[in-house]
Image: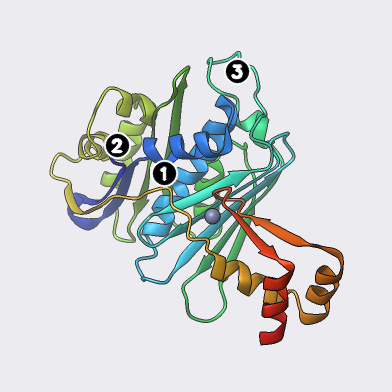
Amino acid sequence: MKDVIIDCLAYNGKVSIKCISSREIVEKARKLHDLSPTASAALGRLLTITSIMGYELKTEEASITNQIKGNGPIGILTAVADSKGNVKGYVGDGKVDLPLRKSDGKLDVGGAVGKQGMLYIIKDLGIGKPYVGMTPIVSGEIAEDFTNYFATSEQTPTVIALGVLVDKNGIKSAGGYKLSLMPDAGEEEISKIEEQIKNIEPVSRMLDENKTLEEIAKIVTGDENLKVLERTEPKFECNCSREKCEKGLIAIGKKELEDIIKEEEKIQIECNFCNSKYVFTREELQEIVVKM
Ligand code: ZN
């Protein structure tokens, strides 16, 4: 089944909610990077929220980079999405796997990411300087860390839930939602949503029970008359290319490239996001230098 994002308005436009099913995206990341269950959940949650945030940018050439640098064993997590919600990502050490949490039997994402560190948000709208936001990590559980970012850095009351269910065959379900209160949301809507969220099931379980995204959006908001404005099908997608590698080589400078040519028969550039390999022979590097 294809992944989907739905964009909805509840309570006559006072509440915005976007829901995503991201099983395919997370499964592709798991296979590509050979991730442990804990690393699958950690990167999966980051890919899920990054896809939603990319989709929210709306402008064609915009992109978003979300990075978590915690003090846990997994190292740095990076995800990049475009405005269609297409996303890619990788982690420092995808083999890190921790025992299930004693308290609730869940994967210990916070333990892998770390409880201390920073969350970085880089929004590139394709015009001028990118916007860079950062907030400290709250718990390393990712949804909480992003909720805190929206509350403190963007001053938008937001509820974020992210979930990845892993079994022996891989990713069983994955997804999430991001609910934001519009400025005209009042006490009535807020208390209704608070009431709903208090008793809600984890989003990965709702997806695993085959609830549709629209049903999930109605459960979260408590609004039966919620309107779905738009649907899109995001993918795990990498846009790396030989041309981009060439630009990267040009960017390191003529002198440095000439030094490489002196020492190396050929060089190989590997894409961190999708593991594609690009080989440049000495002759090919010389051709690049000539053009500089
Ligand atoms: Zn790539």
Q: CA distance from mark 3 to mark 1?
A: 23 Å
**Picture coordinates of residue 199 (x, y %)?**
34, 25
Q: Amino acid at mark 2?
A: Val
Dot 3: element? loop
Q: CA distance from mark 2 to mark 1?
A: 10 Å
Q: Amino acid at mark 1?
A: Val
**Picture coordinates of residue 181 (x, y %)?**
34, 53
Dot 2: element? helix
For the residue carrying disc 1, how many other residues have a C-alpha within 10 Å: few (<14), some (14-19), or many (20+)? many
| Residue nearest the observer in this picture, 263 or 58 | 263
| Quadrant of the rendered image holding ligand 1 | bottom right
Q: Give the left or right position of residue 170, taking residue 182 as reference.
A: right
First in sequence: mark 3 vs mark 1: 3
Which quadrant of the rendered structure holds the C terminus? bottom right
First in sequence: mark 3 vs mark 2: 3
**Picture coordinates of residue 245 (x, y %)?**
61, 67
Q: Amino acid at mark 3?
A: Arg
Q: Write down the residue under mark 2.
A: 220
First in sequence: mark 2 vs mark 1: 1
Q: Are marks 3 and 2 in contact (CB under 8 Å)?
A: no
Dot 1: element? strand
Quarter occupied by residue 164:
top left
Residue 47 to residue 219: above or below: below
Q: Are marks 2 and 1 in contact (CB under 8 Å)?
A: yes
Does residue 13 appear anywhere in the picture?
A: yes
